[in-house]
Amino acid sequence: MSTSTTEQIVLSVQRSTPRLWLAAAVGAVTLVVLYAALPLAGVAYPAARPILEPVAGGAARLLSAIDITTVLVVVAALTVVSIARALPYGIGAVLMLCPGAPLTAAAARSWLPESVLASAHPDGRIVAVASLVAAASLVVPSRVHPAVLGLGLAATVAVSLAAVVTAAASFVGVLGALAITGTWWALAAVVMAHSPIAARRERKNPLDTAALKLRR
């Protein structure tokens, strides 16, 4: 690798990582406010109640379709994509984000005090779906990026609405789930920003990159 190429990679990392760290910090602060500061200040989150009874059955079926097998299949597919695209750091980003976000949500549900209602806990199914979408956004080619983000956003919204409709999660639980996913996405994107292969692709085609999302 030439000196000029190395310098360009360093500059790319220097430009992208501060914003990614900021995004991770915003997510972490959101979680601290939701689950530490506000409860300590005496804020009581209201209990979730089922709404829109006519669609509750379909919403429940949607939530039940999200299981560990489905998640593992998608993670394996994203790992294959990373290998096919010669993005070794992409594999690390996928394996960092997909287990990391759901495990954080599970830990939060175990550690949160009883004063925080279960419906306000970060919903694991929302985290699972959102983290898969976030991981895909880091490794898929640019030509399918809009489709992946569009379908992924629709899936995340659908699962979030299903959780609210069935009272599996309140809006606080949805926000907590998205904050966890966003924090892990930013950290995984930092990994991608430091990938020499990803950096060289950024230089050749700015649209074929995951690390540049916050620079646009």
Image: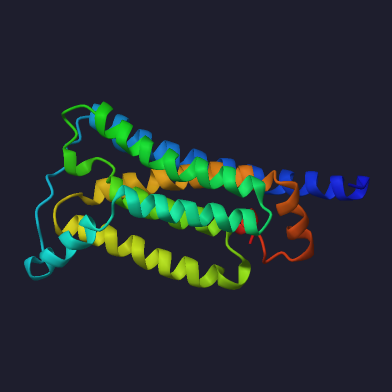
Task: Identify the residue at image location x=73%, y=59%.
Answer: 202
Residue 23 in sight: no
Whether residue 103 is visible here, answered yes or no, is yes
Is 158 on the left or on the right of 94, as rendered? left
Would residue 34 appear left or right of 209 to someone viewing this image?
Answer: left
List the single residue furthest toward the right. Answer: 3
The residue closer to the viewer here, 144 or 157, is 144
Q: Residue at x 35, y 48 (%)?
A: 127
Q: Quadrant of residue 55?
A: bottom left
Query: How far across and how far down the image is residue 67, in percent?
Result: 29, 51
Horizontally, residue 171 falls left or right of residue 58, namely right
Q: How many discs appear?
A: 0
Please name the residue shown 27% across and 26% down the image.
Answer: 111
- Residue 193 spot, x, y in % from top left: 67, 47
The vertical placement of 47 against 111, above or below, is below
Q: Nearer the viewer, residue 14 or 106?
A: 106
Q: How is the image coloured?
A: rainbow
- Position of the C terminus, as image quadrant, is bottom right
- Where residue 191 appears, as percent x and y from the top left, is 62, 42
Where is residue 124? Give x, y as percent: 29, 45
User: 47 or 147, which lies in front?
Assistant: 147
